[in-house]
Amino acid sequence: MPGVKDRIIDASYAAGWRLVCRLPESWAQRAFGLGAEVAWRRQGPRVQVLEANLVRVLGPGVDGKTLRAASREVLRRYARYWLEIFRLPVMPVDRLAGGINDPAGQVKMIFDIMASGRGVVVALPHMGNWDQAAAWFIAHGAGSLTTVMERLKPEAVYERFVTFREGLGMEVLPASGGTRPFGILAQRLRAGKFVALPCDRDVTGSGIEVEFFGERAKMMAGPAALAVRTDAALVPAVLWFADDGRCGVKFGAEIARPAAGTRAEQVAAMMQEVADFFEQGIREHPYDWLMLQKVFVADLDPDRQARAAAQALGNGQPPGTGAVWPGPESR
């Protein structure tokens, strides 16, 4: 039976989806904006981690006033993300489909690849509204989209998020507690389907190191590992909140598999290209990287990382291949 804390958390998410959908949107915007302001002023552990990440983005010479203003803006956009999540189930289809701006029309490249019979795995950072982007892609005729979600606690919250995302048209696989997702993702890609995986943070402790903003950072290598294993196209993408109320999206060119090297070396090289694309997108839209968790190796607890890596290997998980769609605990 769930404990009192679990029941409170579940009730909070349930209320979010019920109440926010019924409130006038302007009221909800003010309420979420106030929540962001309170969180920013408290300067809690998550905000401190956010600002440590922003120092890497803005540069070591950034002054305190500029850094605090940047973290404030990130939290405002983080609140906007949550508001939009809670309102997505009642958003009209035309607004949903029109809520993503693809200025270069690059989504056609994705559909062209899929039309050739190849699957596509899109690697994403925690930027913008990725749930809406997934729903937009499905609304444009993708047919289906498969992703992976970490099993949250309490279980009822995990089930609510799965139901929510399935309602948008996604196929959601559990990262643990069921069939290992890597094989199912590979099947989908071999069938010419679309897979979307955020990967800019090491969730399992078995991620690989990449060069990121001039430092070593750990990311999940699942997107590249799947591309190498299945010959699917690996395409990085970034998202950002635009001033017109929509969410912008930019796809990178397909990242080619290196001609030489072991599989592990090929995966590492491809993930470095993914990291380079993410870095460029985050530099262009620094307020839209909603990363309130530790990413850089210098900030990570080495003992915890070692334990997590050992556990992943004990479960038979290939190093760096864990990949999950974020839930509330991963943001």
Image (spheres, rainbow, N blue to C red):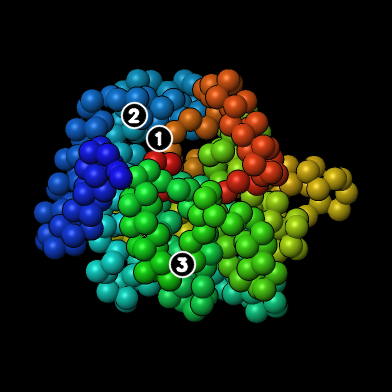
Q: Can residue 11 be seen by looking at this rendering?
A: yes
- Answer with the quarter of the image where residue 25 lies: bottom left
Disc 2: which residue: 47
| Quarter-of-image position of residue 182 | bottom right
Q: Taking 205 as reference, is 47 left or right?
A: left
Distance (Cα) linking label 2 and label 3 = 31 Å
Q: Which residue is mark 3?
A: 170
The residue carrying mark 1 is: 292
Question: Which amino acid is tagged 3?
Answer: Met
Residue toward you, 319 or 259: 319
The secondary element bearing badge 2 is classed as: helix
CA gap between label 1 and label 2 equals 7 Å
Per the model, the C-alpha gap separating discs 1 and 3 is 25 Å
Image quadrant assignment for residue 164:
bottom left
Residue type (three-letter) at the residue carrying disc 2: Val
Between tags 2 and 3, which lies in front?
A: 3
First along the sequence among labels 1 and 2: 2
Foreground disc of the pair 1, 3? 3
Which quadrant: the C terminus? top left
Secondary element type, mark 1: loop
In this rendered view, identify the residue nearer to me: 311 or 55.
311
Q: Is residue 278 visible?
A: no
Q: Position of residue 129 (x, y in %)?
A: 39, 55
Residue that extends furthest to the right in the rendered view of this protein:
260
**Residue sitting at x 71%, y 58%:** 227
Coordinates of residue 277 in the picture (x, y in percent)? 60, 47
